[in-house]
Amino acid sequence: MSRTEILDRIRKKLAVDSEDKTRLQVVESRLANHLPNTIPSRCRQSHSDLVDLFQEKMEKAHGTVNRVNNDTDLGGEIMAYLGDGSFELCINVLEFELDFSAYSSVQTVEWTPRSSLDICISDCFGAVAETGSLVISSSKQMPLSFNFLGEKHIVLLKEDQIMGAYEDIWARTRNDMPRDITLVSGPSCTGDIEMIMEFGAHGPKELHIIIIGS
Amino acid sequence: MQVNSKDFIPLVNLALDNNSLQASLGMLGKGLSFKRTAAVADFPEFDQLRDEARDIKDHCLQYLDIYLMKFEEQVTNKGGHVHWASNEGEAREIVLSLCQAENARTITKSKSMVTEEIDLVPFLEDHGLDAVETDLGEYIIQLRGERPSHIIAPAVHLSKSQVADTFFDQHSNLGFNEKLTERVDLVGEARQVLREKFLGADVGISGANFLVADTGTIVLVTNEGNAELTTAIPETHIVVTGIEKIIPTLEDASTFIRLLARSAVGAEISAYTSFITGPRREEDQDGPKNFHVVLVDNGRSEMLGTELQDMLRCIRCSACLNHCPVYLSIGGHAYGSVYSGPMGAVLTPQFSRLEEAKQLPNASTFCGRCESVCPVHIPLPKLMRHWRNKEFEAGLNPLSMRWGLRAWALLNRHPLLQHMLASLGIRILGLFGNKATGYIIKLPGLAGNWTKDRDFRTPPSTTFMSQWKTMQKNRQKKEV
């Protein structure tokens, strides 16, 4: 009932007719065309510059970035980042083989719904250079909350997964939007106490990205 | 909407005398305005995007009925449900009945100004539900029983030690018995307390920064990650949002994302921006089974086709608050409304009653900074003037002001009378002046309100107009 009431009130205030087919056509053609607006020039440069831009922006947002030439020792790279100590790793990686057999202090755990985690390691849908944002997408393999329930989050990203602009994501997802797409630009933070930034509000306190060259 | 803007003047006096609040406002004013300027300077396309954003919103408002129906169709196709609420009472009842239908007991909530506008959380609590705010600022003020004092930094009026006191009082029953002093520890304690709430919640309630008609997607922006934990874990996700949040496409959303964080806090983007489309898919391992969107009108549609329509472009970035000399002097609570600053001075009379909120549009120097920083070019001074006109038309001003305004108008229509009174006035004022300093430090009667707080320059002995005439005569003599 309120639906009709609200829609009628909108049409009355706009002085338009619900039977007016031309209005519907205007909207339908705008949606069908989904034209981009101005895309910042920084999004359109050579791919190697985009990789650099991604790193620069992610570091500015307090994420850390490490670049490696190949995927031969990703386990070692991850352990180099974590440093000494014993860790519980929860791994959700499809694209790469991770080998931690050389590290006796490392345990791996399975993801279960509604539970907190120590170190989360994942790959991701992609990344956008313009603001140094990872693109995480929920899927059969990837529960969204996996990315938020660890103390630290380590993400493996292939260089060729880095796109320029947000619009590049939609070109690949529009027709079959996953339940969730999240742009992650740095670790979780809050400025709610005296406007000073603290990390690890609710999500990961640290975000580390390993970019793997091609 | 709960409003106590009638008490504006006493609340302003309290705010001006509150040293701790003044310190917080000082940090806010310096910090955010400086950061925004730097972010804009680093983004050459900013002004072009602002124009585009204004045009996108104007287009959507012109076709609002159709876009809302397109959005509804898409949400429904994806297995979600759309509910329509004409006013705040209906919105609250819809949310309550959705919670009750799921036998929900615990609710996590991410930040949403619409839920503040409709007083949702107190209503759910009155009905026996445990509803907890998860944005840190909102959580702090919920514990203190306060309202937000800023639309994106709700606890900006509080100091670290006030937060520490609040946590010490309210968390001791949860086994936290240490009085904390460090910010990082306060954030850590809230993280622990709220993590348990996230993991156990039956329902998650969020707002929406944008609604994308083309795909039925809702867009949520946070720095903390609380929106994602609120929306991904519980079995039910309820979105409560205003009808004006609609935009056509994901491409349009991209434009607004580029403007929002830069305008709000001078960041290029917030830490997390989520695009949520429908409920959990069959193969997904988390996400809500039930996905509901409650579209709230509550006075918005009445603004269409009027001068106030421009206000419906607002994306709640808070740039107008952060740059307003009045807001930065008195803070949000003085406004007596959850919407404060220039945007609040325009929205509050619409969402409550003009009689209640008439002081707010008057609390502006019309310096124009709000309009100059608005990412969607809302003519905020013009809209405050709109309410001042309405106030005068409805006879709501005090008699002294009405006569004062009439007298002013009369003088401006009769220049000769104005000149006579002006030359009389400056002669009288001159009598109060101190010759040595050139200032008047005390005036009698009503004018004493001015000299109570500041000195008044002694006027010259003749008016500008008579000085002008003398100059013109002298020049003519010379030419002759």
Image (cartoon, rainbow, N blue to C red):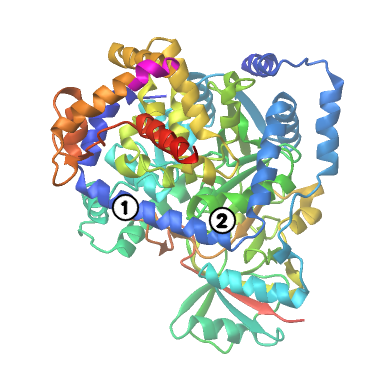
Q: Residue at x 59, y 69 (%)?
A: A57
**Label 1, residues with CA under 10 Å away: few <14, some 14-19, many ≥20:** few
Q: Earlier in the sequence, mark 1 or mark 2?
A: 1
> Which residue does the numbered mark 1 point to in the structure image?
B26
> Which residue does the numbered mark 2 point to in the structure image?
B272
**Magenta span:** B413-419
The quadrant holding residue B72 is top right
B388 to the left or right of B227: left
Q: Residue at x 47, y 43 (%)?
A: B369
The verdict on residue B49 being magenta is no
Secondary structure found at label 2: strand
Q: Position of residue A132 (x, y in %)?
A: 62, 66
The quarter in which the N terminus of chain B is drawn is top left
Q: Position of residue B231 (x, y in %)?
A: 56, 45
Select label 1 or label 2 by which is in front.
1
Looking at the rendered structure, the number of numbered marks drawn on it comes to 2
The quadrant holding residue A73 is bottom right
Q: Residue at x 76, y 66 (%)?
A: A44
Q: Check the image and report above or below for B4 versus A138.
A: above
